[in-house]
Structures are given as structure tokens and as C-alpha cells.
Image: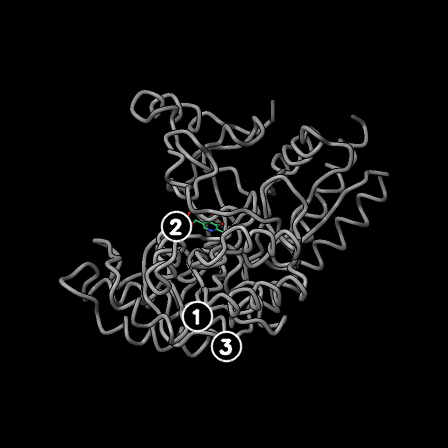
Amino acid sequence: MLGLNRTRDAALRARAEKVVPSGMWGHLHAAKLPGGYPQFFHRGEGGVLWDVDGNRYVDFMCSWGPNLLGHHHPEVEEAAERQRRDGDCMNGPAEVMVELAELVVDMVGHADWTQFQKNGTDATTTCVTLARAATSRRKILVAKGAYHGAVPWCSPSLLGVTAEDRAHLVYFTFNDVESLEAAAKMAGDDVAGILVSAFRHDLGFDQELPTAEFARAARRICDDKGAALIIDEVRAGFRLNAAGSWESLGVRPDLSAWSKAIANGYALAAVTGADWLRTAAAQVFVTGSFWAGAVAMAAAVATLKIVRRDDVPSRLAQCGLMLREGLETRSRQFGVSIRQSGPAQMPALLFDDDPDYRKGFVFCNSMLERGVYFHPKHNMFLCAAHTEADIAAALDAAEHAFSVVAAL
Ligand SMILES: Cc1ncc(COP(=O)(O)O)c(C=O)c1O
């Protein structure tokens, strides 16, 4: 057991157990992490988080993505507060929706238009619906093991899901052109779209950037079949390249789904699309009571302007590289063999010879005890508020944590 005080967290868990099934649901359930992790948090500031017992952590999960600029970024908060004073949930959108749409269309390379939702799942589901509506076809090609949300057509759990919910998904392997071609062949002339993550970031595995060959094959198959290439940017969006994660590969999608970082922690998602999908986007009935919320849109305008002004992806990459190089050096120092994968802005750290993630769990618990919040299986996130001192603190903690793993 860790030396951290967990009194208030334990009391809250006991109360929650009585009124919330198992005390928490989904990916934020602390039971999915090693035993020492807190369930409840009190506050965040910049790249730092405090739990309900007052323990402080330099945070490398960044709310699992939404915290892009740092908690309570003054410019974002001021924009949100200004809008909150005027109104948030009204009988229609506020003026800020048009400003945000113009900004998104201006920033995102492939975007001729955009629509807004709340969660990433809303955006990926809308993309799938639009591709089907525009093509009058049914099949969506998806990568095995990829996460696109938590509703029956895409949830990683099969509990409560029927075979019919998945009937029109055809699976391929990420970065495997042959398997993508085979999936396209199997779907024949019923392909509505290919849905693919910006890069492979499956839980518990090494991350993989798309090869240019794979990206071009996905584009070619969609062009040949008159189908929509859909990139799921929910997790990577605005961290790798604000114009789109595949811009550097020279491949543009027809649709993209965005959320998480777009409004620096305010609930907002977006779909961006190419002109040929505009009519379908105008005709399908996709909506939600809170989808036009003006406060999150004001926060998004402020966030995206800062992303562009400060070239946030480059800043995150710089910080991420510092972390990556430091972890590499320190792991070697203790003869611990690690694998770091994916873009530096979203690092993943796994240990060799660690099939049950035991080394990862021990390492992360040790980090936690020294005030650094890492994840043992999931990709992590840098935010623009992380300082060199935060990275140095993480590396100091890692030095000790690697020594603990070496002694296992
Ligand atoms: C790649 C990807 N797509 C979709 C989603 C679903 O987003 P949300 O949880 O906001 O519904 C996530 C969430 O983690 C994600 O990482």
C-alpha cells in the first residue's frame, strides 16, 4: 500500500458504492488502475492535479486528453465566463457557433464544413451515419481493436450488444494494406466508409503511426469505391497537427471526428467534412439537447486560437521528447528494458517481459507516490502547461521507480 493519505477518497468510495453501481463506471473507474490510485479529485491547475486528500500530481493523463492547454487556462476561462454571463443552453445556438465553425473550417485542412456535438462518440457515430446516408451503403471498415466510443456499434465490450449492432462492420488490421484490401473486397459494392484512428493507440499495446502506404491505400480504396475516408481524431486531434493528423502524409479524409482537446476541457465535439457530404450532413437527423451549448463553443474558439498562435503541437512535442529521452536514459541506468511508442505528444510506456503489466503497475504506483500521475497501459498526454520543472520532477520520480522495478 502506498504511503499517500487516502482517507477522504476511501470515504467517498464507500458512499458512492451504495448509490452508484460499483462506485464508478467506465474508463475512469479507479479499479482499472493499480491499487494506489485515487478515484476522486479536487482541483486542477495547469499541468497539475490534486486529489480529494490533497495529494498533488504532475498529471500526464490530462483528463484523458481534454486538458490541452492546462487546467484553468486564463484566456479560455475568460471566454467561457463571458459567454456564461450571456447564456449557454438556449433555444438555438449563440453567435459564437458561427465564429467557431469558421475557425474550424479555416484550420482543418480537409474541412469544407463542420457540425458540433458533445462527446467523441457523438462525432464518430455521426460520421458513420453520414457516410451511410451519403452513399446509401451499409459497410464500415474498421481496424480490429480500435476504440471509437462506447455505444453498441463500437463499444469494446459485447455485454448488452447484439450481433445486429455490429452486422455491418468489416475488420482490418491497422497499417496492413493487404488486410484493408481484403476487407474492402469482402464488403464488395456495399462500402460506405473506412473509419480509422489518426494513429494506432489501442490500450495495452505499443502505439503505431500510420505508414504513408497504408494511408494512401485507404484513400485509394475510398476513391475507387466512392466511399468516405473517416479519420477518428478524437484522441489525437490538435495535439499532432491542428490541420489534421494525416496532413504530413499528404492524405486527406472526407470526414473527421474531433472532441477531447477542442475546448480545453469543456464538453464539445465536432465533425468536419468535405463538400460532397454537405447535403447528407444537412439532411440526416443528428442532434442533442446540449449540442449547441454556447459556453463550450466560446471555450473552443479561445482554445483553437491559442493552438494556432502558440503552435501548441510543437511545444507538446518538445516537452514530450524531453520526457522520452529522460525515461530512456534512466531506464538504461537501471538495466530495465522499456518500450516507448507513438508521437512524443502522446507517449506510451510499456515494459519488456511484462505480459500482465505487473512491472508497469509497480512503476506507476511508485511514480504516483512521488507525485507523478502516469498510466501503466494507456497512452498518456502532454499539455502546454507542463513546464521543464514538471518534466524534471517526473524524471526524478522515474529514477526511483525504475530502481524499484529493477529490484523485482
Ligand atoms: C479515438 C477515440 N474515439 C472516440 C472516443 C470516444 O469519445 P468520448 O469518450 O468523448 O465519447 C475516444 C475516447 O476516448 C477515443 O479515444
Q: What residue type is labelled 3?
A: Arg
Quarter of the image for the C terminus: give it: top right
Q: Distance between the residues labelled 2 and 3?
A: 29 Å
Q: Are marks 3 and 1 in contact (CB under 8 Å)?
A: no
Mark 1 or mark 2, which is nearer to you?
2
Task: Give the quarter of the figure containing the N terminus.
Answer: top right
Judge: label 2 CB < 8 Å from ligand 1: yes
Q: Are marks 2 and 3 in contact (CB under 8 Å)?
A: no
Q: Which residue is drawn at 21% across and 61% down?
A: 88
Q: Mark 2 points at which residue?
A: 121
Which residue in the protein does label 3 denote?
A: 309
The kind of secondary structure element at disc 1 is: helix
Residue, x 71% and y 30% (percent of image)? 355
Residue with the most extreme left position: 91
| Residue annotated with mark 1 | 304
Mark 3 or 1, closer to the camera: 1
Which quadrant of the figure has residue 247? bottom right
Position of 257 with respect to 90 (left or right) is: right
Question: Which amino acid, by three-letter code, is at mark 2?
Answer: Thr
Q: Is mark 1 within 8 Å of ligand 1?
A: no
Task: State which tag comes first along the sequence, 1 or 2.
Answer: 2
